[in-house]
Image (tube, rainbow, N blue to C red):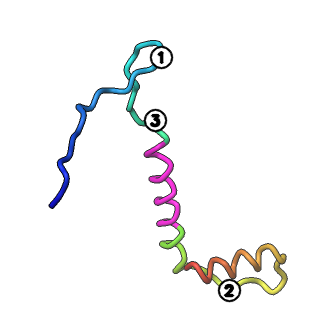
Amino acid sequence: MSAPLHTRPVRPVRHRAGGVADARLHWWVLALPALAFGLLLLLLAGSGEAQAAPVHTSPLAQVTQQILRVVG
């Protein structure tokens, strides 16, 4: 047997000054994930055009290429 559920009516959140809280999203909340998705999509699309690395590359370039091989 379940217990009765008592709920209160939902009221908007008010600031100390008496105004109602603004619930709109900023533009970057949607733009940043969309940008990250687009960049990852470009990274995956361009991985088929990868070429062999030159013999004399810097250690940083070698590490970057290894990471891209694992990811791609």
Distance from Cα at disc 3 to Cα at disc 1? 23 Å
Disc 3 on helix, strand or loop? Answer: loop
Q: Amino acid at mark 1?
A: Arg
- Confirm whether the magenta stretch covers residue 60: no
Distance from Cα at disc 3 to Cα at disc 2? 43 Å
Tag on residue 46?
none
**Which residue is under mark 3?**
26
Tag on residue 16?
1
> Would residue 48 be found to the left or right of residue 57 on screen?
left
**Which residue is under mark 2?**
52
Q: Quadrant of residue 66?
A: bottom right
Which label sits in the foreground, 3 or 1?
A: 1
In the rendered image, residue 12, in percent from the top left (x then y), is placed at: 32, 26
Q: Amino acid at mark 2?
A: Ala
Determine the residue positioned at 46% across, 12% down. Answer: 17
* Residues shaded magenta: 29-42
